[in-house]
Amino acid sequence: MIAVQVQSPSAYSVHGPHSPQARRIDSLGDAMYLTSAVVFAVVVAALFWATLRRRRVEEPSDDRRERSMRTGVIVATAATTIILFVFLILDLSVGRAITTNPGPEALQVRVTGHQWWWEIQYRDSLPQNWATTANEIHVPVGRPVLFELRSTDVIHSLWPPNLNGKRDLIPGNENSIWFQADSAGVYRGQCAEFCGHQHAKMAFLIVAEPPDSFSAWLVRQRDTAMTPTDSVALRGQEVFLSSSCVMCHAIGGTPAGSRIGPDLTHLASRRTIAAGTLPNTRGNLAGWIVNPQAIKPGVRMPSTRLDSDDLQALLTYLETLE
Ligand code: CUA
């Protein structure tokens, strides 16, 4: 199994842009920080100048003082107005550039927010070609990707800082966001709207890869799970289908078809479990199945009581779901 989280610290930062959209936001932010720094320096310098000057120079006449104060106020007000107006224009133009729809060549991905995980669906004109996964969004490099955003419970917000700004997922209201990743990598994203107890543990990964690898990945995701040939894994499948797992999860190619929790058809191909909370390792998976409430208190997933042999068999089965 792969236990990679993110490639580098810049893989979760607005200052490490990897899309034209994020670059515009980053540049606007830089211009704002720089301007604020200059304004701050000018104000502090003016303050020092005024303080020291008072001590050295004799008090000017009331008339002169009045005039110079008026000039100062007019200049400062004009400068403030111009700066704010320039930023208003820049802000609107960046907003327009990042929200204008990308055109029909964009790949469409449906993202549904749940407390506290992300359902990801790649749709197709043929329903048998749909692929459903969770918490890990794969995108091809160099192609616009349009995300249709929905929520089944409360308001969430999709925020992949390296690739674009935030956009809310609102129950009963469709929303969208798009970006075009321009370099391959694994980027972290986070729910950015407080959505309950485990809001902080509602993360996701965006895996941007070359178009060929992306297409190969998508073809694999459309496959249903193979019936295990190994006897332990086969026993694990029986455990899965006879325990409470089956009430919430789907595994393509088996009778398990519930959509309450994440689709597990390709669980073993994902890098993390519990919405980016833990690397997807056998040990973490065991802990998660036995006592998810200890890892993510309040999560909808109940604890599953299994004897040791059944748990090991179940883990072996889940590891075959690539
Ligand atoms: Cu979902 Cu915060």
Image (spheres, rainbow, N blue to C red):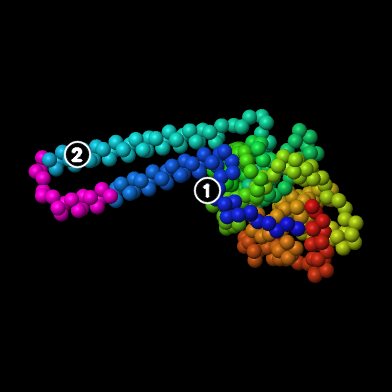
Q: What residue type is labelled 2?
A: Arg
Q: Do the residues labelled 2 and 1 touch (CB within 8 Å)?
A: no
Q: In this view, does 72 lie to the left or right of 14?
A: left
Q: Which mark, by number, is residue 15?
A: 1
The residue lying toward the viewer, choosing from 56 and 214, is 56
The quadrant the N terminus occupies is: bottom right
Find the residue positioned furthest to the left.
61
Q: Residue at x 67, y 40 (%)?
A: 141
Residue 25 on image: x %, y %: 51, 41
- SS assignment at label 2: helix
- Up-down: is 244 above or below 210? below
Residue 122 on image: x %, y %: 72, 40
Q: Is residue 57 left or right of residue 140?
A: left
In reply to whether residue 282 is colored magenta, the answer given is: no
Can residue 271 be seen? yes
Q: Which residue is drawn at 46% across and 34% down?
A: 92
The residue lying toward the viewer, choosing from 160 and 198, is 160
Q: In this view, does 195 lie to the left or right of 135?
A: left
Q: Residue at x 54, y 41 (%)?
A: 23
Can residue 168 be seen? no
- What's the magenta region? 45-63
SS assignment for the magenta stretch, majority:
helix
